[in-house]
Image (cartoon, helix red, strand yellow):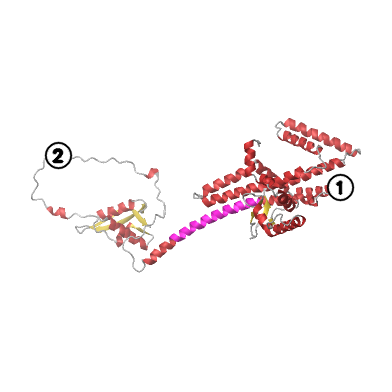
Amino acid sequence: MLLDIETLEALRRQHPAWRLLASESVALVASFLHRAFVVPNRRAIAQADLAEALEDALYALREQRADGVYPKGALEYLNDWAANDKAWLRKFYPPGSDEPHFDLTPATEKALAWLASLSERSFVGTESRLLTLFELLRQMSEGSETDPQARVRELQRKRDEIDAEITRVLGGNMPLLGNTALKERFTQFTTLARELLADFREVEHNFRGLDRRVRERITLWDGSKGALLQDILGERDLIAESDQGRSFRAFWDFLMSRSRQDELTQLLERVMQLEPVAEMAPDPRFKRVHYDWLEAGEHAQRTVALLSQQLRRFLDGQAYLENRRIMDILRGIEAGALAVRALPPAGDFMFMASTAPHIDLPMERPLHTPAMKLALDAGDLAAGDEDLDAAALFSQFVIDKAALAQHVRQSLQQHKQVTLAELLHTWPLEHGLAELVTYLSLAAEPGRAVIDDTVLDSVGWVARSGQRRHARLPRVIFSR
C-alpha cells in the first residue's frame, strides 16, 4: 500500500486500529483485550463472563489509583468498545443463544500485534528466517519450472544430498542443532503460529461481510430468484477463488488430515521437551496450537454455513409466499362458488385459461389460397318463363351444423367413443345426403374423429320421395 498523505489521513479517520492507538484509554483496552482474547486464544466470550473479568480489572485499577479513574461500569465500556464509531469488539448473538457474545475484530488484533512488537526482544534470531527465505525461493523456483530435465536434475541433487547425509549419520557424524538455533527456530514458530491465528479472524471477517451484503440484497430484492442466486453465488465464488480463499482451503485440507494432526502432535510434544526450549518457559498451550487452528478454522466455516442457511431461508420464504398466493386464489374461487350456490348466475360467470397448450407446427399451417375472381356476365336480362313451377324455391333447407355437433357431444357423454353408424342409429338422418356430408365435415376437423379406411360401414336414410337410400363409407369414430 502506498503511504501517501491522503491514504494516511483516511486511515486515521476510518481505521479502527488507528482509533484504538490514538484513544486515551488505549492502555486499558489493549491490556484487557490481549489478556482476555489473545493470550488464551479465545474466539467468543459471553457478555456476562467478559463483563465480570473487566469489572475485576477495573476494581484492581481503582484500588491502585484514584477512585475516579475509569468511572463507567464494565458493561458500559464493552458496549462502547463495540459501537460503530470504535469497532474494537464485535458484539453478536451466536446460533442457539439469547445472550450476546463478544469477539475481537481483525483491526484490533492488528493493533495488539503491533503494540507487542514494540517491546524489546531479548533474543533476535536471523538464521532461521534467512533459511526460511531461501526455502521459499527454492519452492517458488522449483514449483514454476516447466522443463522436465531441470526438474529431474534437481530431484537427483536432493537425492544425492540425502544419500550423503545418510552415509555421514551411519559413519557416526550426526550434526545437531545448537541451543541457539533451537531457541531461534522455536521463537519463529511461536510468532508464525500466533500470526496464523490472527489471520483466521480476518478470513472470518471477510465471509461475515459477504453474509451481511447477502442479507441486505435479500431484503431489498424484488427481481427473480435465479438472478439473485447467480449474483450471490458469483460473489461467493469470487472470494473462494481468490488468493486468500484458495490458500485457506489448501490450509484447511492439509490440517483436516488425521495423519497430519497426529504428526503435529508428536512433533510438538517432542520439541516442547527439548531442554533449550523448556528453558524459554513457553506457553503450554503451544502443545495444542494445531487444535486452536482447527477451532479458528471452524469459526470461518460456520460463517460460510450461515451464508448457505440464509440462501435456504430465502428460497423457502419465496416458495411459501408463492404457495400462499396460490391458496388465496383457490380460497377466493371457493368463496365465490359458495356465494352463488343458492342462486347460480345465468350464463358464463367465470373464465379460466386453457389447461393445455395449443401448438401450431409450421408445416401444419395451410398454404395461401388465392381468392377466386367471379366472372360477371354483363348480358341483357331476358324475360322469364311464366309457366315455371316456383315450388322448388320453397323446398330448400339448411343443415344446422351446431345441432349435429351437439348430437355428437351428447353421445360422447355416455360413451368414450362412438362410430358414425351408431350415432345415426340414435339420431337418424332427416335431410339425407346433405346431413351425412355435414357429419363427415365435422369428422374432418382436427381432433374431432378418426377415420378407419380398412373398415366400411353402411348407413341409410329415407329420401323425400319415400325411397330408402343407402351409402357405404369408411368407419368414422368420434372420441372424447
Q: Is residue 58 visible?
A: yes
Q: Is residue 253 visible?
A: no
Label 2, label 1: how many angstroms apart (C-alpha)?
Answer: 132 Å
The span picked out in magenta is 301-329
**Quadrant including the N terminus:** top right
Is 366 inside the magenta-drawn segment? no
Q: Nearer the viewer, residue 84 or 203?
A: 84
Q: Is residue 139 left or right of residue 14?
A: right
Q: Nearer the viewer, residue 103 or 121?
A: 121
Tell me the residue that label 1 is attached to.
279
Which disc is residue 390 wearing?
Answer: none
In the image, what residue type sits under mark 2? Answer: Ala
State the image coordinates of residue 364 (x, y, percent, origin top left).
38, 45
State the image coordinates of residue 4 (x, y, percent, origin top left).
64, 35
Question: Within 10 Å of the Cα at label 2, are there few (<14), some (14-19), or many (20+) other Cα atoms?
Answer: few
Q: Is residue 474 left or right of residue 108?
A: left
**Quadrant including the C terminus:** bottom left
Q: Is residue 117 above or below residue 340?
A: above
Q: Earlier in the sequence, mark 2 or mark 1?
A: 1
Q: Nearer the viewer, residue 229 or 472?
A: 229
Is 315 inside the magenta-drawn segment? yes
Residue occupying the point 40% across, 45% down? 361
Residue occupying the point 41% across, 53% down? 356
Disc 2 or disc 1, which is closer to the eye? 1
Tell me the residue that label 2 is attached to.
378
Question: Within 10 Å of the Cα at label 1, are there few (<14), some (14-19), or many (20+) other Cα atoms?
Answer: few
State the image coordinates of residue 65 (x, y, percent, origin top left).
76, 54
Residue occupying the point 64% across, 41% down? 11
The secondary structure that dominates the magenta segment is: helix
State the image coordinates of residue 339 (x, y, percent, origin top left).
37, 66
The quadrant in which residue 195 appears is top right
